[in-house]
Every structure is written in C-alpha cells, then in structure tokens.
Image: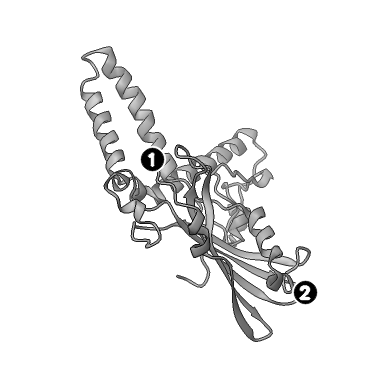
Amino acid sequence: MSTRAYRRSYNPSFYNQRFTTSQGIDHNYVHNVAPFHAAEGCAPSKTNRDPSKFKFSDNLWKNDYWEWRMRVGDYIYQIFNRLHRSNDGWTRTLIGWTGFSFLMFNQAFIWKFHLFFFSLTTLARIRDKGAEPTMDEVWVLDTVFANEKLRKLFSPDTYHIMDYDQEWDAGRDNPYFPEYRQPIAKFFNTDCNTTTGRYKFGDLESGATMTLHFKTMPFSNNKYNFSEPFMVYDMWAEVQHEGKYFTEHIVKAEEILKTKRIFVLWH
C-alpha cells in the first residue's frame, strides 16, 4: 500500500479527502465550496499561470450546471470504480433476464412490465454494489478517547486527522468468514462485503502520531436485514511518540466474533 492513499473521488483534490466525501451514492453529500464553484467546476489542483485562462462567472445556470455535473460525475465514477463487485451470478442473471424481456417487449404487456421492473432492479443493485464504504467517525473518536493509553497522547481538543482511507476487501478468502464460501452466498456476492481502512491521527500538543487500522463487516440484529453495514470487528493503533513506537489493540476480532456473526447479503 502506498504511504499516502487519498480517498478517491471524481473531483480531484490534494486536500484531506475526508472533508470532500463522495457526492455520489454514499448519502454523505458534502458541499465543497458552499454554493459556489470555480469556473471549471471543482477547485483546481494545479495553479494555471496563464492569466487569460480564468473564466469566472456569476451566471446562475452555469453554477447549477457544474453543481450537477460534479454530483453526477462522482456518482458514475464511484459505480464504475467498483464495477467488479457486480460480477456475481445474481446480477448476471438479472442482466440476462432484462435482455430477454427486451427481446419479448412487443409480445405482451407482461414483458413490458418485466423490462421496466427488472431494469430498475438491476440498475439499483449495480448502484448499491458500487457504493463508497463509509465509517461512523463519531464512534471512532469515542472509542479512541475512551482508551486510557491513547487518551494520554491524544486529546479531543488538540487531535487532528491527517488522512483517511477505506475500501472494500476483494475476494472471499477471509478465514474469519467461511459463510461467504457457501454456494448460495457465492452466487449473490463476489466478496465478503467487508472493508479495510485506516485513519492517520496527529496531536498538536503531544506531537504524537497514530495510524488507526480498522476492519468492518456487515452485521444484523435479526435474520432479514443488516442493521450495521460497517460494524468494526477489528481495530488496532500504531503510535509513534518521541522516538518510541508501540501498538494498542482496541477491538479484537476474536472477542467480537464470539458473540456476533457476519450477515450474508443476498439481494
């Protein structure tokens, strides 16, 4: 993994990407620059030295155009960035049935209904499979500051998050979750719906830095729908302070998985 992995977005930026979360389908829309955008949409990541190239405008329609272009652009970007997650048996079946309904479109009304319904179903599934994973940052901060060892070096008043990254895990070979290697689970999923991520912390007063690693899994309080799509089952911190290095295991997978089981998603 690279030393610095920015959160990927359609709108380029060299700034902390956790402040410019996806404007697509993760339901955490963040307005980059209030209601105003630069002349070419998102803020430039490189200074243009040609003074004749600045095309600022107060045209309301142009601002709206860039607003929606940035939203839709990231919406599509996030989906295609994770299109491989839709290569499961159920999605391929939906695509095949939708295509067959299109061929039978002029035969009867039932085929028109099937085409309309299964087109929307297939598109919604691909959209959801391409969604950007998210994290409950309030829970993360509460957990970090509740740890006695970390609380000595990181304060709620002086901490700073320098970097953040989270992405879906590839494959179904996680030894903790054999449930996803069952035939019916493999038909509906290309992976275990787990994610791996990290936060990079710093503290202005102590000078300490910390890389907080975490792993999440889908969890449900019942059998039918998952109540926590990103429940942390493993979390540990790598801390550096005044030339010293230590690790602190905050949430242990072995303990969490004694009482909780991963939820296997179908549709």
Image position, residue 109 (x, y; %): 28, 13
Locate residue 90: give its quadrant. Answer: top left
Locate residue 247: give its quadrant. Answer: bottom right
**Considering the image in quadrants, where does the C terminus appear?**
top left
Rendered position, 220 above or below 246: above
**Considering the image in quadrants, where does the N terminus appear?**
bottom left
Name the element at disc 2. loop
Which residue carries the number 1 mark?
A: 126
Identify the amino acid type marked 1.
Answer: Ile
97 relative position to 201: left or right = left
Crowdedness near tag 2: few (<14), some (14–19) or many (≥20) residues, C-alpha within 10 Å: few
Q: Residue furthest front?
A: 258
Q: Earlier in the sequence, mark 1 or mark 2?
A: 1
In front: 237, or 91?
Answer: 237
Q: Residue furthest top?
A: 108
Which residue carries the number 2 mark?
A: 205
Identify the amino acid type marked 2.
Answer: Glu
